Amino acid sequence: MRTVIRLLLLAAAVALGTQAVGWVAPAGVGLLWGVVGGDTRRPVLVGAAAAVAGWAGLLVSHAIWGDLGALLSRLGGVVGLPWPVLLGAPLLLGASSCGLAAWCGTEACRFLGPRRETVS
Amino acid sequence: MRRPAPPEGRRGRPARLIAAAALLGGGLVALGTPLGPLPPLGPLLDPASGVWAVARSAILPASATARLPGLDGPVSVVYDRRGVPHIFAETEADAYRAQGYVVARDRLFQLELQTRATTGRLTEWVGPLALPADRLMRSLGLAGVAERQFAQLDTTAPDHLALRAYAEGVNAWITGLEPRHLPLEYRLLDIRPEPWRPEHTLYLLQRMNWTLSYGQLTPKRERVAALVGPRAADALLAPWSPIQEPIIPNGREAPRFDFTPLPEPELGPGRLALDPVPTPPSTEGPLGSNNWALAGARTGSGFPILAGDPHLELTLPSIWYEIHLVVPGVLDVYGATIPGAPGVIIGFNRHLAWSFTNTEADVMDYYREAVDDAAAPTRTRLDGGWRDVERRLETYRDRDGAVVARDTFFTSHRGPLLREGDAWLSLRWTALEPSRTQRALLAAPKAENARDWLTAMEAFAVPPQNALVADRFGTIAIRSTGHFPLRPASRGGRVLDGSTSANDWTGYRPPARMPQAIDPDQGYLASANQQPSDPLADSTYLGADWRQPWRAIQINRLLRARHDWTPEEVARLQTDPRSAKADFFVPYFRDAVARLSEQGRADSIVVEAGRMLGTWDLRYTLESAQAVLFEFAMEELTTRIWDELGDDESTRAHTPPSALLPRLLEDPTNAWWDVRATDVAETRDSILLSSLRAGFERAREEHGPPGTVSWHWGNVRQMQIHHLLRIPALSALDVPNAGGTGTLSPMGAHGTHGASWRMVVELGPKEVRARTIYPGGQSGNPASPWYQDRLARWSAGELDAVSFPVSPEELLANQVSARLSLTP
């Protein structure tokens, strides 16, 4: 349950951060998450999943208040890719940057910080 | 539950940290950096303000408020169900401010692309790829002319005020533009919009001048003369059309054909002379327009009806934007505007309606100049003295500001000084002279009757237009209006001696001497780019190489036939698929087949082709197989007849219009029929038959056996409506069109040009009823429901009934799709 709550909070942070500072937000959130939550279970995976959830939420908002389907259809034609691949691209980008940053934060914490014990 | 701590060896290992940091940092840098022509992927894929946000900005909010600095008062904008903004303002300047704002909201990229195309700054977006186009525009100096024209305007003049107000509106949108509202094209090119300056509107008008009046008659004639001699060249580029169905009624009930034999080709020097700049597409193309007006005596209701459909290059978004501007007591105009221009170009108000077709007049001349320095002239000789040459260094840059190329251009007192071999030629062109066209376009829509409208249009300079107007009082009128040079020589199309001012223009035709007609006895007026006046009535030189008269013939034939036209029937005429061209040529093909059959020498292909043409109703319906055969046969005929001018369309010095062929068809042994590449001397019938056979075989080769759907006209030729960046996925390709070369809804071999706007207006004494359509939609956003929503109806020949409310309240709630309040 705690993991789910963490994930949702992180997803919200990713979404709000992206609104505020743009596409680098997942990396920033992930880095922070790595530092503060690096000793939790699977911090990298949680970070990546949160980024996917956060960015998916933003995409869903475009589908609700705009015509994302029409755009995907057009863009798919422009780049020569089917729309699911197109839609997966930002999710992959968000997940990888947040997960990577979480890993980075975790390692930095381990390298620089005092010796800690991992809790679940 | 506590988990055991990780092994000591894994804790704090710097290699892992370095690897993670390197991967993260490298990834972020890579995603933030452009990869070749691709924009940086990070910002592009950002789900908040990246490309995805285009989906959200595709739909206008039902209600929005925005600040527009400079407004004199609040402005209400109501978008109807078709995405047309109805702007209600308190002052004229506010109406143009709001217009600039809403046009930028829908078409920002188009605005900027047009500006850059005219100023020759496309390399700054796409690099050396655009260098040829940029060089051409800068060599003509169109932007500099526009800037001088703007600088010369009185700052209190109405056009100056309108241009400034419009720019304020555009800039208000750009300034308030959030990154998430950036149009798709900016994202794909990784660019940002530049501020709009008032003179940018004049750039746009210069672009229209380039499209519509850059006739290049002189280079064409010189090249033709070099190949077949001056006598034949003059006949092929004659100042009078061999088929007379003039705009100004000549009292005849049918076209007059000139069957005088065409002068035979002589062996010229063969050198392709005088090609300082590229020539526009062949005159066979469908770039042209229709308009006609019916007086009350010709309509069922007794009210005048005006119809107009300009034929231009079709693009997505469209060249046109539909708008309604209301300033109580000052302005109440509806119609089509070009994004970038304040006001309405073609449209109607509560009293009258108007439309244009291009006059195709000859408005440019070349002068051979004597220069002081053949390598880099500083002066040109004139009347025994010297005139200074202006020198201009042009630098082309890429998106990073690096220099792509540099050019030095020269300008004489006449215009651009262009090098052609060892010679220097000055180009004088009305588009490069002072102009009050914008003022005319702003004043005319305020007129309350046709005569006042014509008076307002007297200031119109370039590109010359056949300006048609009808008012609710029953008046219909047309005038070929614009700057028509008065030349000392009897005709243009020749390189003139620049060392004497005796060859210079002496002025422009005054309005009273322009071709015009008001309330003719025939009860209607029509133009389709044909020669305006019958030379038997007015032999003054206006131009040469006149466009095909086939559309004019068909319009006149249809309009003459009835006195009870309704707006619905008039709208149907705009896509009438009957071909007057086929009407003329098909009998010649059939007769040639019949003569061959009588001799017992007709083969099965010729017989079959002749039979097909014999059963044709001469209509370019989508199912017509005969239209395919006829078009292919005519293309083959063109190649065979004009072989002296080049082997094919791409290398031909000039493709004479098919309207010249009557002069050959009644002269079966004229040397033009002979194909020089063969040993035998061909005649009319052998060329007609070989063209028909080749057309049939080509159709069979490309589309299988006749009788199958693949032979249907609708499957062989379609409209190709490209996106402005020619991105196929953002284009509308293979759009059916029931028309071909010479029909009222024309379509050439490439399908890139056609009816860019269709309008039918009935002018009742109390109510104006209008229908309009254009191939596309109001929004430039490809994800918008208004991007190409009108295309299917346009293709089917349908028009939309338009809302023409007096006030915002007059639009019912179910007719409104969005509201925008603009405040100072």
Image (cartoon, helix red, strand yellow):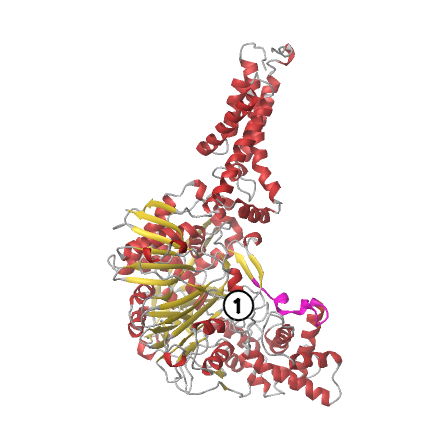
Residue B292 location, quadrant: bottom left
Please provide percent x and percent y for residue B276.
49, 65
Residue B345 location, quadrant: bottom left
Q: Residue furthest bottom?
A: B598
Residue B381 location, quadrant: bottom left
Please provide percent x and percent y for residue B8.
63, 10
**Which residue occupies 59% across, 34% down?**
A92
Q: Does the image show residue B377?
A: no
**Which residue occupies 50% across, 36% down?**
A58
Please provide percent x and percent y for residue B81.
43, 56
The image shows a total of numbered marks equal to 1
Residue ID for mark 1: B281
Please provide percent x and percent y for residue B717.
61, 66
Is B485 positioned to the left or the right of A92 in the image?
left
Q: In this rendered view, identify the residue nearer to me: B303 or B195.
A: B303
**B560 is higher (above) or lower (below) than B806:** below
Judged from the image, the secondary structure of the residue bearing numbered disc 1 is loop
Q: Crowding near pointer 1: few (<14 within 10 Å), some, many (20+)?
A: some
Magenta residues, as a range? B702-719
Q: In this rendered view, identify the residue nearer to me: B125 or B604.
A: B604
Label 1: chain? B
Indicate whether residue B577 is drawn in magenta.
no
Q: Does the image show residue B636?
A: yes
Is A43 positioned to the left or the right of B430 in the image?
right
